Image: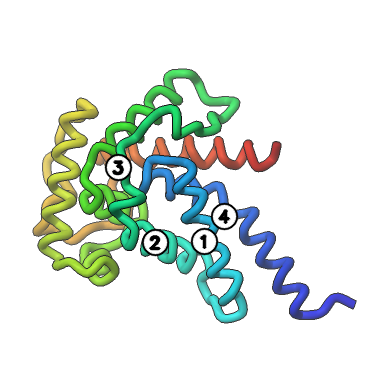
Amino acid sequence: MTTVHEHGFADFDDFVARTRPGMLARAVMYCGRREEAEDAVQEAYVAAFLHWGGLREPRAWVAQTMRRKFARDAGRWWSRWRHTELELPAPAAAAPEEEAAAVAVLRTVALLPPRQRQVLIMVCLEGLSYRQVSDEIGISVGAVGANLVKARQKLTVLLGLTPEPGDPGDPLVAASPAGTLIGDPLAGLLRRTESWLVAGFAEEAER
């Protein structure tokens, strides 16, 4: 007979299998390098395993643990993107231009200073509010907005995007969940890049 404890382990294994491609993709968006992304994700899952019985929202808990790891080790984890170190699995169905676009976005985002990149990903991909980002990383709400504006301005120029009226990066405007940034070209690029990463990691896991 299978015990409740064993069921817990089975549930954890299933949780890791279902969520790991997405966690790896998000980690790569944060740090720009696969090796560091895998280390951070592995550490977060180990921590989740140790607390498994008490986690009500394990996906959110693992994501937050991973973010805190990157924030704590920013000087060591955030480094300039180098193609030879990325080695990302491309989805089989993806066109070459999709891969080129995703790599270009990753390479450009990696040029941002650590704090700007962290705030950008937390707001535009994690869907966190300015207040949530402020509380988690220990900076003021105004500093969150200022870092987001700087990041968006740099990427808009470097990626050749056209700024939209009422840019959600305005520090005086409360952040919206990433899914509601309709018409925001930068948020759209970030989401498409992450989706490309998720598909690649999922296919790699199946193989």
Residue type at tag 1: Glu
Q: Is residue 207 left or right of residue 39?
A: right
Seen at 55% across and 35% down, the residue is 200
Looking at this view, name the residue that lies furthest to the right: 1
SS for tag 1?
A: helix
SS for tag 4?
A: helix
Circles 2 and 1: CB distance less than 8 Å?
yes
Say the numbered circle drawn on residue 187: 3
SS for tag 2?
A: helix
How crowded pointer 1 is (Cα within 10 Å; few <14, some 14-19, many 20+) is rated as some
How crowded pointer 3 is (Cα within 10 Å; few <14, some 14-19, many 20+) is rated as many
How crowded pointer 2 is (Cα within 10 Å; few <14, some 14-19, many 20+) is rated as some
Disc 4/disc 1 C-alpha distance (Å): 14 Å
- The residue pinned by badge 1 equals 43
Disc 4/disc 3 C-alpha distance (Å): 22 Å
Q: Nearer the viewer, mark 3 or mark 1?
A: 1
Residue type at tag 2: Lys
Residue type at tag 4: Thr
- The residue pinned by badge 4 equals 19
3 or 1: tag closer to the N-terminus: 1
- The residue pinned by badge 2 equals 69
Q: Is residue 189 left or right of residue 171?
A: right
Camera-nearest residue between 131 and 13: 13
4 or 1: tag closer to the N-terminus: 4
Q: Nearer the viewer, mark 4 or mark 1?
A: 1
Image location of residue 133, percent across then percent down: 26, 64
Circles 2 and 4: CB distance less than 8 Å?
no
Q: Which image quarter holds the C terminus?
A: top right
Q: Is residue 145 left or right of residue 36?
A: left
Camera-nearest residue between 43 and 165: 43
